[in-house]
Image (cartoon, rainbow, N blue to C red):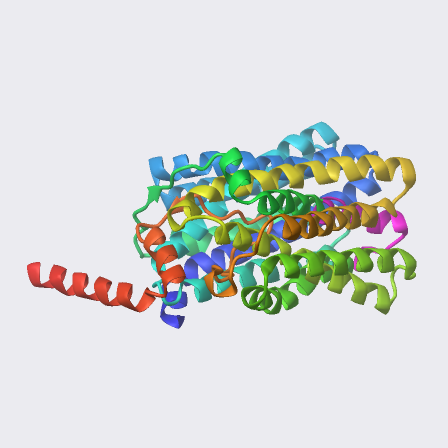
Amino acid sequence: MWNDVRATWALLVGIGFMMLGNGLQGTLLGLRATMDGFETYITGIMMSGYFVGICIGSMFSPRLVARVGHIRVFAALASSASIAILIHGLYVNAATWTVMRLLTGFSYAGLYVVTESWLNDRAGNENRGKLLSVYMVIVTLGLGCGQFMLNLADPRKADLFILVSMVVSFGLIPMLLTARPAPAFEMSGKMSLRELFKASPLAVISNALTGVAHGTIFGLGAVYARQTGFSVEAVSVFMACFLFGGLLFQWPLGQLSDRKDRRVVMAGMAGAGMVLTALAVLVPPGNALFFAVIALLGGMAMPMYSLCIAYANDRLEPEQIVAASGSLVMVAGIGLSAGPILVSFLMSVFGPGVFFSGIGGAFALIFLFAVYRMGQRAGVDVEDQVPTLAAGQIGTPVAEISAPDALDYVEAVISGEVERLDEQAEAEGDEVEKRL
């Protein structure tokens, strides 16, 4: 695995800096909008622009990569993201910020597509899951550490906007200087949303509701914290707790779901999330117990997306898995976009406490629908479940560009033939060398 990491270090370092800037940017905009007196529902609409951009970008970015290549797309979209945050600092109004958030989301969708398809191509079959796990750790750490950069300057000034632009631009350097060639790839087919829902209603509904919860957290978390009276330092800790809690629980919950009926694990996580959102309302905000509750809540919320993806894969044929990724991203994007708009409107009417009600409501619906589906359909045998690899988290859509061996890999995971495929690849490599 470490050979694969060394081979892709430029890509991993680059995306790490991108996530550092993205983590700071999202919280900075929510905080600054509240400080500048934006109406809560206007802030929700503005913040949802990022997730709309993610949806659009996930559809169009593969075509851009197919036309001009990975490195050019990465450079162009990173530059666009860098420019967008500077425009935020120059023109402080909701309309401009909404358009720039959409551009930022589009840009980051392309960055994810480039990164994930490149990693998928470079990793060997036996190490792909581990390498993608390293990638997800870097993404989450980048987003989490970006929260603390909020304390480096006054959010009311342009300094932090400039800092985000610098960090994002710095992430370009290792990528542009890499001497390794970009991978060959082919675009995957598509599975319609109707076909996906027919195959797995629970995966579709839970994915959308998980999007609502995540969109509320990342779109309105800083708004809630500021309206509750948190200092800038406390806002950064509040947002970081969600991410680091998710990082802590991602692996153990994924492993548990591989060994048990995945629906039971999802229902248990949703039930725990409901309890934790209630505790977050009851515990005095800002003390150590409150932040511990938030970290646990993040631990239930953040890994849910990976479990939804894994459950969908359990219900799909091997050749359908890659084709379904686009519809899964679209479903998540709908929830991501709707969450901040709906919850921000309710917050403007009933107060900031509705923030946790929105997250808890999404968890409640996941819980009820998971229990309902358990009564309607037999579960997949544990030994037949697809392993929960690093499926990504909301905001990092699984790339719709499949590496040449992606379908073979999926089949190998399900059938246990990874070793056979490795031997086959080695034999083919030897044959090529003989011909040369």
Q: Residue at x 55, y 56 (%)?
A: 17
Q: Is residue 227 left or right of residue 85?
A: right
Q: Residue at x 36, y 62 (%)?
A: 415
**Predominant SS along the magenta part:** helix
Image quarter (top left, top right, bottom left or bottom right) of the C terminus: bottom left
Assess whether residue 135 is covered by the magenta stretch: no
Whether residue 233 appears in this view of the structure is yes
Locate residue 275: give its quadrant: bottom right
Residue 262 location, x and y as percent?
Answer: 59, 59
Residue 21 location, x and y as percent?
Answer: 61, 52
Q: Is residue 52 above or below residue 220?
A: above
Which residue occupies the foreground of this view, 262 or 220? 262
Q: Is residue 203 left or right of residue 352?
A: left
Locate residue 331: give its quadrant: top right
Whether residue 83 appears in this view of the structure is no
Assess whether residue 229 is covered by the magenta stretch: yes
Number of marks in the rendered image: 0
Q: Is residue 103 left or right of residue 366?
A: left
Locate residue 409: give its quadrant: bottom left
Q: Residue at x 61, y 50 (%)?
A: 22
Q: Is residue 431 above or below residue 163?
A: below
Which residue occupies the foreground of this view, 83 or 377? 377
Residue 308 location, x and y as percent?
Answer: 58, 52
Residue furthest to the left: 435
Q: Is residue 418 left or right of residue 152?
A: left
Residue furthest to the top: 95
Instruction: Give the residues drawn in magenta, as a range.
Output: 216-236
Residue 141 location, x and y as percent?
Answer: 60, 62
